[in-house]
Amino acid sequence: MRLTLDNPRSVAAPFGDRFAHVARLDLAGGALLMLSGQVAVDDDGAVIAPGDITAQAERIFEIVGGLLAAHGAGFGDVLHIRSYLTDLAQLGGYAAVRRKVFTGRPPASTTVEVSRLFLPGAVLEVEVTAAR
């Protein structure tokens, strides 16, 4: 068993290098990937489309897809997804994007409403656990 903490070059570095984007646990025959929560930021770390959950969901899944790909995985390898929304009334916009990403059987899921996220204008944060 081997643990690697990674920040793939394909995705902007974490804010202030305070965390790793991916914790990878290599096991016999595969690996467990635990991704840090992702918000919709551009390559400079600015929130895109403040307040727009649909645009933010699309960007977040773009980032998550890049992190998974950097470890040889894809959305079909996702075991569990955790979603944090600042307003559950916007769940429909997020769910529509998610249905496009997870076209087969969807992964296990947790969705909660939070009072705010750490970046102003961010309305959604998503973290993922995957196995490859």
Image (cartoon, grey):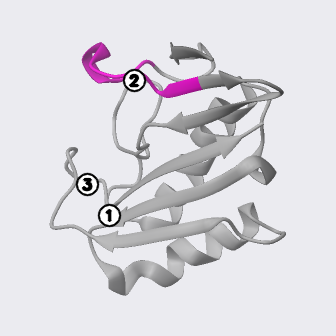
Q: How far is disc 1 from disc 2 in space, using C-alphas?
A: 18 Å
Asked if residue 62 lies left or right of residue 85, the reply is right
Answer with mark 1 or mark 2, whichever residue precedes in sequence. Answer: 2
Residue 112 is situated, as x and y percent measured from the top left of the image, at 33, 72
Numbered disc 3: secondary structure: loop
Mark 1 — residue?
51
**Does 94 sit above or below residue 72?**
below
Which mark is first along the chain, 2 or 3? 2
Residue 121, compared with residue 13, is above or below; it is below
Secondary structure at badge 1 equals: loop
- Residue 109 in percent (x, y) is at 54, 68
The image shows residue 125 at horizontal and vertical percentages of 39, 53
The answer to if 65 sits in the magenta stretch is no
Q: Which residue is the extreme one toward the left?
A: 115
Amino acid found under the numbered disc labelled 3: Gly
Quadrant in the rendering for residue 62: top right
Q: Nearer the viewer, residue 91 or 105?
A: 105
In this view, the residue in front, 127 or 43, is 127
Q: What number is the disc on residue 3?
A: none
What SS does tag 2 mark? loop
Toward which corner of the image does residue 31 lie, by quadrant? top right
Mark 3–mark 1 contact, CB under 8 Å? yes
Q: Amino acid at mark 1?
A: Gly
Q: Quadrant of the N terminus?
A: top right
Q: Magenta span covers which residues?
A: 13-24
Please name the residue shown 60% across and 25% down the image: 25
Kindly report the distance in space between the C-alpha atoms of the residues bearing marks 3 and 2.
15 Å
Distance between the Cα atoms at labels 3 and 1? Answer: 5 Å
Asked if residue 22 is among those painted magenta in the image, a careful observer would answer yes
Report the residue marked by disc 3: 121
Q: Kindly identify the amino acid type of the residue bearing the numbered disc 2.
A: Asp
**Dot label at residue 44:** 2
